């Protein structure tokens, strides 16, 4: 959301952050200009989930791209919420919330981190965490699995 002035934005942040919407707390944060524009690599761009990106080839052992798979997410949990959760652990090269052909969430997806250490930190902190009332599973993607897409 864009505001006419920083003061209006700050006022909205103060008034709405933590406010309950349909039984869920609204969480607001300032835009991070260092992350680039929406739709660029590593940023949420309304991706519908074709699953075609090349992370995780080293199984998380090297320093390069590493793919993390998450499961058991509530179907109604927004993709942006999940991406914001993962971006706390490092630079995200790709994010994919898996969807049915009709566009409905499958409650699972994958995240490609630029560095293996960031992916491992996300797994360590988020595997078994509660998100929207459900315990999620987060693990490093292993090479031979199709991931249930």
Image (tube, helix red, strand yellow):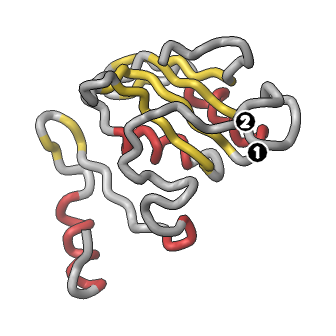
Q: x, y (%) of residue 84?
A: 46, 47
Give the label on residue 37, or none.
none
At x 51% / y 61%, what residue is drawn?
40
Q: Residues within 10 Å of mark 1 (few under 14, many from 20)?
A: many
- Label 2, secondary structure: give it: strand
Give the label on residue 66, or none.
2
Identify which residue, 8 or 62, lies in the foreground: 62
Q: Quadrant of the N terminus?
A: bottom left
At x 69% / y 36%, what residue is drawn?
55
Residue farthest to the left?
22
Determine the image quadrant of residue 94.
top right
At x 74% / y 18%, what residue is drawn?
143
Up-down: is 28 above or below 60? Answer: below
Q: Judge from the rendering whether residue 143 lies leftward or rightward of residue 104; answer left or right.
A: right
- Of mark 2 and mark 1, the one earlier in the sequence is 2
Identify which residue, 25 or 3, lies in the foreground: 3
At x 36% / y 20%, what residue is drawn?
106
Up-down: is 7 above or below 72? Answer: below
The mark total stands at: 2
Identify which residue, 67 or 81, lies in the foreground: 67
Determine the image quadrant of residue 64.
top right
Q: CA distance from mark 2 to mark 1?
A: 6 Å
Q: Judge from the rendering whether residue 125 lies leftward or rightward of residue 50; answer left or right.
A: right
Residue position marked by numbered label 1 in the rendering: 115
Q: x, y (%) of residue 41?
A: 56, 56
Check contact, mark 2 vs mark 1: CB within 8 A.
yes
Q: x, y (%) of residue 78?
A: 31, 38
Q: x, y (%) of residue 51?
A: 52, 31
Q: Judge from the rendering whether residue 75 lies leftward or rightward of residue 71; answer left or right.
A: left
């Amino acid at each position: 959301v864009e505001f006419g002035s920083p003061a209006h934005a700050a006022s909205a942040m103060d008034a709405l952050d933590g406010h309950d919407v349909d039984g869920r707390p609204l969480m607001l944060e300032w835009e991070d200009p260092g992350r680039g524009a929406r739709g660029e690599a590593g940023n949420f761009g309304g991706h519908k989930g074709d699953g075609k990106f090349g992370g995780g080839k080293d199984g998380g052992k090297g320093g390069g791209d590493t793919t993390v798979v998450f499961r058991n997410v509530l179907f109604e949990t927004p993709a942006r919420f999940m991406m914001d959760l993962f971006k706390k652990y490092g630079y995200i090269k790709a994010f994919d919330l898996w969807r049915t052909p009709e566009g409905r969430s499958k409650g699972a997806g994958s995240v490609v981190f630029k560095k293996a250490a960031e992916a491992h930190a996300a797994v360590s902190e988020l595997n078994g965490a509660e998100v929207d009332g459900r315990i999620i599973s987060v693990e490093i993607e292993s090479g031979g699995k199709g991931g249930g897409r």
